[in-house]
Structures are given as structure tokens and as C-alpha cells.
Image: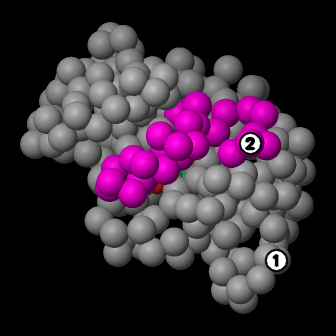
Amino acid sequence: MTRLSVNINKIATIRNARGGNIPDVHRAAIECERFGADGITVHPRPDERHITYNDVRIIRPDIKTEFNIEGYPSEKFIKLVCEVKPHQVTLVPDPPDVLTSNAGWDTIKHNDFLKDVIAVFREKGIRISIFIDTDISKIEAAVNTGCHRLELYTEPYASGFPYGPEKAIQPFIKAAEAARELGLGLNAGHDLNLDNLKYFSENIPWLNEVSIGHALISDALYLGLQNTIGMYKRLLSE
Ligand code: PXP
């Protein structure tokens, strides 16, 4: 079954709006797990505008499910990941000032860079996933970087879904098939929500994991965190 990793960055965004420790990001991570999340994702950015590097260190020892750290592999990021040793690191090609991740890696252009970074994480026994678009040539070029999984950037699926789910999912099925044939595991994330998640996961049943933040934390405002996580989990298991 596809696993649900809850991205808790948005909770840190609310906390940072005021300073202090409300809402408590550490507690939120523990509660997400208690309510059924299969993993916790954090995305520390260089300006620490949501999750801070210190949050990552504090949360890590108490995560009983899968801890996934995503981000651009700057020197500081690599050092943090090697220190904290999450179960999975997801490499994202974000420029530092971008609002949110908005593209996958160019695995052809940055092949040597990715190879070097991935070798460091492999040595620490950390699973590596790389954020990628549905372009098959980029997927094929990912294999020799040494990554274990790909995370499909699902924003184009989410934005196309209301106008025609079948058309929106097609490139993702092709990309997912290519990844499977190449022996790579598969994650997905970005703009997945209660409307579009079920269709995505039932069309790609070999999907290992989805990472969801913005919509899930927003739904929790209306529906409660426990109820919301239960709803997302049901969509993945039906
Ligand atoms: N995956 C990656 C690599 C991301 O950068 C993000 C956003 O931080 C997500 C998944 C989750 O996207 P969303 O917040 O839209 O659910």
C-alpha cells in the first residue's frame, strides 16, 4: 500500500509568524504519527523560514515511523542530513529564495553533482530519492546517480486534474512505468489533496509513498488533524 508521509513545514510557518512555540512542531510530528501517518517529512530551507535546522535535530529522535528530509543539497544541508541520519533524504533542486519546489532535477546536466552527493548519503546508509519531472530521458539519466527512488513532481497532475484526470495522469503513468522498469522505487508529491489523491494512487498502485503538506495541514483546520490523516489514509487504501 502507498504510504503517507506528512510534511509538517506549514505548522512551522504558523509558529514562525509569531515567534514562540505555538503550534509546537515537535508535538505535531508525534501526533501525526499517532493519528496514522506512515512518515514525517521536513524541508529545511536556507533561510529557515519554516522548519529550522534545530527543529530537525529535535524531532529526529522521536520519530518512530519514517523520517524524510528534503531539500537542496547545499554543504549545510548535507552536513545536517549526515548528522541526523533520516531514513530517507529527498533531493530537490530549489533555488534558495523560491516559494515552494517548482521543478524536478535536470539529471542530465547535474548528473556528476548528484552522483557525488548521493555517494555521501549512501555511505551513511540513507535511502535517497530525487525529485523529478515526468520527462523519460531525465528518469533514465537518474539511474546512474545511485539514487534508490524518484519522487514525481505532481503539480502538473494536480493543476490538470480538474480539467481531465485521464489526460493529467498519462505522463505520470508513463514515468512511473519507466521508473519501475529501471528498478527504482517511486514517491510522489506536490499539490496532492483529498480530491486528486485517490485517482493518482489507484492508477499507479506500485507507488511507494506520497508526501503531502499544504492541502493536508489546511484540511486539518476544518476537519481536525486526526480525522484528516484518516481521510488521506483511506484514499490510499480503498
Ligand atoms: N515534495 C517536495 C519535494 C516538496 O518540496 C513539497 C513541498 O515542500 C512536497 C512534496 C509537498 O507538497 P505540498 O505541500 O503541495 O503537499
In terms of secondary structure, where does tag 1 sit? loop
Residue 82: say if magenta: yes
Residue closest to the eye, 69 or 226: 69
Please tell me whether mark 1 or mark 2 is closer to you in this view.
2
The residue where tag 2 is placed is: 61
**Could you tell me which quadrant the N terminus lies in?**
top right
Residue 142, above or below 206? below
Residue 223, above or below 126? below
What segment carries the magenta color? 60-88
In terms of secondary structure, where does tag 2 sit? helix
Compared across the picture, whether 107 is left or right of 22 comes to: left
Residue closest to the eye, 192 or 109: 109
Residue closest to the eye, 16 or 184: 16
The residue where tag 1 is placed is: 22
Q: Residue at x 56, y 36 (%)?
A: 85
Q: Residue at x 77, y 52 (%)?
A: 29
Residue 24: say if magenta: no
Q: Position of residue 201 (x, y in %)?
A: 58, 31
Q: Quadrant for residue 102, please give it.
A: bottom left
Compared across the picture, whether 8 is left or right of 199 comes to: right
Earlier-in-chain disc, 1 versus 2: 1
Alpha-carbon neighbours of circle 1 within 10 Å: few (<14), some, or many (≥20)?
A: few
Q: Position of residue 217 (x, y in %)?
A: 72, 62
Camera sees residue 176: no
Q: Residue at x 32, y 55 (%)?
A: 74
User: How far apart are the alpha carbons under marks 1 and 2?
Assistant: 21 Å
Alpha-carbon neighbours of circle 2 within 10 Å: few (<14), some, or many (≥20)?
A: few
Compared across the picture, whether 39 is left or right of 196 comes to: right
